[in-house]
Image (cartoon, rainbow, N blue to C red):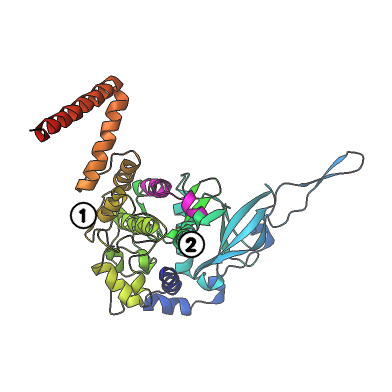
Amino acid sequence: MEAAVSNQATLAWSRMETQFPAELASTMAGASAASRVTRIDASQRSLSVLPQIETDVGGQVRLVHDPRDRYRSLGVVGEGGMGVVERAEDVDIGRPVAIKRLLPEASHPLGVARFVGEVRIVGSLEHPNVVPIHDVGLDAEGRYFFVMKYVEGQTLGEIIERLRRGDPEAHSQWPFERRAEIIISVLRALAYAHERGIVHRDIKPDNIMIGRFGEVWLMDWGIAKKIDEPDPGVPTERGEDPTAGLIGTPAYMSPEQVRCEPLDARSDLYAVAVVLHEFIGLKHYLNHRADNLLGLLEAIERESPALRGPGAYDSPHQSSPPVELQIVVAHGVAKDPAQRYQSAAEMLAGIRGYLEGRGEVRCMYSFTKRAMRESGRMIDRYPRLGVALYFALVVLALVGLAALVMLSLG
């Protein structure tokens, strides 16, 4: 059922990504093929610059200047409504890269505007948790593309699915502390972007990549935008069709995103809280709405993840998640943005508090855990005091035991 949520969201996004208001749609429909794809001559293409190096049997080096397409495609690795992603080789540098190429049917003015926006937004985010852009260009068919670092690993969605199935190796690799660290990396990327006035708008497990050596990347900034800039072709309020103009993946949208209201950093943080809830609980809180897009949108505004009590985090493959992380989720999924974390740094501090034993106190259980950890820190800092307290407790226990014995003897 959880997989159905992901599939439903993907299908919905594939439809929404190519939806535009009627007036723009008619304009694009009337556009000529020439205006959609710009044909270019070879001088405008991205060609190799460095020569090939050949060495003959006598050890003589010869330089062969043979300009060719700089990026050699090695196959498609993904496709969406607007573009296709390919694995390729940079023949000049000799390294693998990823290329995102705009589809011909998306090469209308609005599609190109979105593509250029993605290039410039990602290009401005020089952060270790954001995949960098190396180059931009036009291919032989006049299609725009940009070149990114090629990253290998697995998506958070794939990891959650392994955990959900009860994979022993996955559960060994992904204790709750490690899961918290992944979300912290995502929040670092968002803190950097938000500080520059950029919102991602499509945070979900499939857009979070974990590399072979523990690297974490927040991927796919294709619908990211500047907070204070308008979104071309997108209405600012919901019309008769509640799905018209929606941008993002429905299952991870904030209530204000569903309502097509202006978004800020807090909308991204809502999505992060939903991802965290799914990562520690191994199920999406709206899995029962997966087969109905309209029902899913309504539920986002009315339903919240179960955070306490039976069924909240039931899984046959793991224990109940730490209460400190449950508190972070509860704070992050508040329907009213004013009641949520107000910044990525604030949410990050809440999760780091769990890792450092300084989690927020919201109940007796969290108070007890915090008190025990603080006591341990005090003993580490003042070991003599710890020894004195230990002997004091032993003496009190012996005195109490002696008193009970005397009372029992009459």
User: SS class of the residue under badge 2?
Assistant: helix
Residue closest to the eye, 42 or 147: 147
Whether residue 188 appears in magenta in the rendering, the answer is yes
Residue count near mark 2 (Cα–Cα under 10 Å), binned few <14, some 14–19, many ≥20: many
Outermost residue, left direction?
410
Magenta-colored segment: predominant secondary structure: helix
Q: Is residue 218 above or below residue 356?
A: below
Q: Which mark is residue 339?
A: 1
Q: What residue appears at the point 31 percent right and 76 percent down from the top-left corner? A: 295
Identified by mark 2, the residue type is Phe
- Does residue 1 appear anywhere in the picture? yes
Question: Which mark lies nearer to you, 2 or 1?
Answer: 1
Q: What residue appears at the point 91 percent right and 42 percent down from the top-left corner? A: 57
Residue count near mark 1 (Cα–Cα under 10 Å), binned few <14, some 14–19, many ≥20: few
Q: What residue appears at the point 47 percent right and 67 percent down from the top-left corner? A: 111
Q: CA distance from mark 2 to mark 1?
A: 34 Å
Q: Which residues are magenta?
A: 169-193
User: SS class of the residue under badge 1?
Assistant: helix
- Residue behind mark 2: 115
Identified by mark 1, the residue type is Gln
In-image side of 217 versus 305 (left or right): right
Expressed as whole percent of the image width and height from the top left, the position of residue 62 reads: 84, 43
Quadrant of the rendering where the N terminus is positioned: bottom left
Residue closest to the eye, 369 or 182: 369
Expressed as whole percent of the image width and height from the top left, the position of residue 314 reads: 34, 61
Q: Is residue 214 above or below residue 264?
A: above
- Does residue 244 appear anywhere in the picture? no
In-image side of 278 versus 390 (left or right): right
Expressed as whole percent of the image width and height from the top left, the position of residue 318 reads: 40, 56
Whether residue 314 appears in magenta in the rendering, the answer is no
